[in-house]
Amino acid sequence: EDQVTQSPEALRLQEGESSSLNCSYTVSGLRGLFWYRQDPGKGPEFLFTLYSAGEEKEKERLKATLTKKESFLHITAPKPEDSATYLCAVQAGSGYSTLTFGKGTMLLVSP
Amino acid sequence: DTGVSQDPRHKITKRGQNVTFRCDPISEHNRLYWYRQTLGQGPEFLTYFQNEAQLEKSRLLSDRFSAERPKGSFSTLEIQRTEQGDSAMYLCASSSTGFKETQYFGPGTRLLVL
């Protein structure tokens, strides 16, 4: 059974204080690893897809990396508007294309 | 560029009533997914359509739940005889066909069963 574990559950940062969120996974053949951002009361917003170990993607202050066992979402010099829950999900290589999500990391950036 | 839309955004119902939710996917997407999300948890897969065919159902989808996508466009999710444990956010996502497709989510329908 595919499993995704995210840590920490919650993270509080000061504006400008860089940090990383972790996503550990077990999956029967990884097709893709996805990062989403979710604001309270809204649906998940797509950020990145990573397909193979060693791959990196960047968007503004966010950078996602992937190894064979985990992914990191690095946040550089965060701003209060980066406050949200960040969700990690995996898609298995076999079967249909459903996503298995972790519980998310709730990030709060204080000014 | 219209994204995935869902209706209603909020629904309050009494235990035992039936409810129906609608999802309109991104127009060129032929894959449609339903997920359920409870407080403090990530979304959990419920069911998946490719065009009008329902190809996969989660064990979470009890016989009180039914989903349709009659013409391969919009989809409905019906819950019969609602229970308090059905209270959750119901999310719809869509994607194009392909091995490396991305799922784009709608705003969700928040259901509260009293």
Image: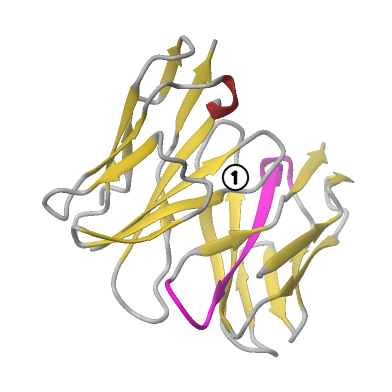
- The range drawn in magenta is A79-96
**Is A81 included in the stretch rendered in magenta?**
yes
Q: Is residue A34 above or below residue B7?
A: below
Q: Is residue A87 left or right of residue B2?
A: right
Q: Which residue shows up at 68% across the image and 62% down it?
A: A61
Along the line of sight, which residue is nearer the eye, A72 or A97? A97
The x and y percentages for residue A71 are 74, 74
**Chain letter of the residue carrying label 1:** A
Left or right position of B66 against A105: left
Q: Quadrant of residue B66?
A: top left
Q: Nearer the viewer, residue B91 or A64?
A: B91
Which quadrant does the N terminus of chain A fall into? Answer: bottom right
| Label total for image | 1
Q: Which residue is mark 1?
A: A38
Query: Could you tell me which residue is drawn at 58 percent across and 56 percent down?
Result: A36
Local crowd size for mark 1, using a 10 Å CA cut-off: few (<14), some (14–19), many (≥20): some
Q: Is residue A35 above or below residue B24?
A: below
Quadrant (top left/top right/bottom left/bottom right) for the C terminus of chain A: top right
Q: Position of residue B59 (x, y in %)?
A: 52, 52
x, y percent for residue A92: 55, 77
Give the image quarter of residue A76.
Answer: bottom right
Taking depth in this image into account, of A33 and B15 the one nearest to the observer is B15
Q: Which kind of residue does numbered mark 1 sit on?
A: Gln
